[in-house]
Image (spheres, grey):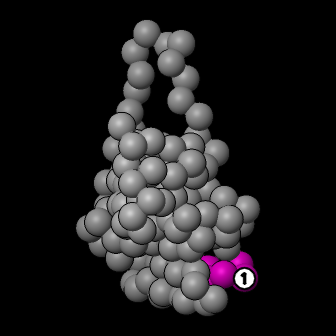
Amino acid sequence: MLTILYNQHKKQGLGIILISHDLTLIAEFCDDISVMLGGQFIEKGSKKDIFSNPKHPYTKLLINSKPNFSKELLEMKEIINNEHSPCPYYNYCKNSLKICKIRIRSYSNNGRFLKCNRGFENA
């Protein structure tokens, strides 16, 4: 089904929006990627930029995650936004800063977008 959509996209110049946690699928069909967490865009960029140099820790987690279907029961961890922090990844981030509990900064550079207080240079 996606192959049909992709072929029509190329043939007629149509846009396609795919929503998925499967970054392998996204990499196959998309040129640009936007990563969302907790209803917020946290990182955007070209496929090449996102996969070769992910900046947000959640983006890195998604790229490095590989499902293990050999287990009888798959455990899913729900990421819950900390009500006292503007960053939806704060409770899970190993590199969080004190400022992350107060506010979160957004950065934009050469078509890339990042919502993380560590910024492009320190992510």
User: Residue 75: x and y, percent?
Assistant: 40, 26
Q: Which residue is mark 1?
A: 121
Horizontal side, residue 6 vs residue 118: left or right: left
Crowding at dot 1, Cα within 10 Å, few <14 / some 14-19 / many 20+, comes out as few
Residue 79 painted magenta: no
| Badge 1 element | helix
Three-letter amino acid code at the position of disc 1: Glu
User: Residue 105: x and y, percent?
Assistant: 48, 87
User: Residue 76: x and y, percent?
Assistant: 38, 33
User: Residue 98: x and y, percent?
Assistant: 52, 79
Seen from the viewer's position, the closer of residues 65 and 44 is 44
Q: Residue at x 42, y 68 (%)?
A: 13
Query: Which part of the image, by quadrant, shows the C terminus?
Result: bottom right
Q: Residue at x 56, y 73 (%)?
A: 45
Q: Residue at x 73, y 62 (%)?
A: 52
* Residue 121 visible within the image: yes
| Region of the chain picked out in magenta, as a range | 118-122
- Does the magenta stretch mainly form a helix, a strand or a loop? helix
Horizontal side, residue 15 vs residue 121: left or right: left
Residue 120 painted magenta: yes
Horizontal side, residue 49 vs residue 101: left or right: right
Seen from the viewer's position, the closer of residues 29 and 20 is 29
Query: Which part of the image, by quadrant, shows the N terminus?
Result: top left
